[in-house]
Image (tube, rainbow, N blue to C red):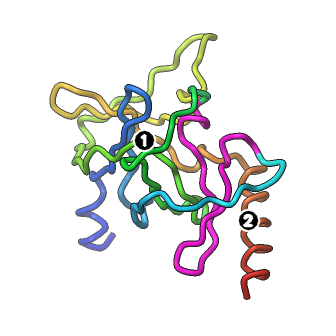
Amino acid sequence: MSEQQDALKEKYVTFMSKNEYFGLKIEYVNEIIVLQEITAIPESEEYIKGLINLRGKIIPVIDVRLRFRQEPFDYDDRTCIIVINVQSTVVGLIVEKIAEVVEIPEENLLPSPSIGHGDKMKDRYVYAIGKVGESVKLLLDPDKLLNDDDLSMVEQVSEEAEVMSE
C-alpha cells in the first residue's frame, strides 16, 4: 500500500441524510459536486434519479434517501452529489448536505448491529459504526448501494448515452 493510500485509509467523507450521519471511505470518493441538471431514465427504480453529464462523461445518480426508503426531500443549495467508484462504475450519490471529512481509526469501528426482523432498509448498506467523539457515523458499503441489476442497467444506459453524445 502506498503512503498516500495508507494516509487515506481511515478517512471518511460524512454526510447527512434525514437526521443521521453516514460516512463513505474517502478512497471511493472521486469528487463532490454541486447538484446539476439530471436527465431521467425511463422505467428505472425510483431512487435512480437519472444521468448527469460530468465534463463529457455520462454518469448515473441515485438519491440516497430514496435508496434507504426514507421520504424524499426538496433539493436545495446544500444538496450535492458525491461522485464515487462502485465496482469500476462511476456513480453519483445525491445527499442532503456534506458534513465533514473525519478520521476514524480502526479501533473506533464497531460492527454493524444485526437488527431483528424489523430491519430497516438502510441497515443492509451499513458495514460498521464509527465512533467520532460523542457521535456515531453509519459507515456505508458502496458496493451494496447498487445491486447487480441496477449496475448492469446503469452501465447499459451510460454506454448508450456515451455513444449518442459522440
Residue identifier under label 1: 96
Q: Quadrant of the C terminus?
A: bottom right
Gap in angstroms between the C-alphas marked 2 and 1: 25 Å
For label 2, count other residues whose C-alpha is less than 10 Å away and answer few (under 14), some (14-19) or many (20+).
some
Residue identifier under label 2: 155
Q: Nearer the viewer, mark 2 or mark 1?
A: 1
User: SS at mark 2?
Assistant: helix
For label 1, count other residues whose C-alpha is less than 10 Å away and answer few (under 14), some (14-19) or many (20+).
many
Q: Position of residue 126 (x, y in %)?
A: 48, 34
Question: Residue at the right extreme?
Answer: 43
Q: Residue at x 82, y 53 (%)?
A: 42
**Left or right: 47 in relation to 103:** right
Depth check, front residue: 88 or 108 = 88
Q: Which residues are magenta?
A: 45-68
Question: Amino acid under label 2?
Answer: Glu
User: Mark 2 or mark 1: which comes first in sequence?
Assistant: 1
- Would you say residue 53 sits in the magenta stretch? yes
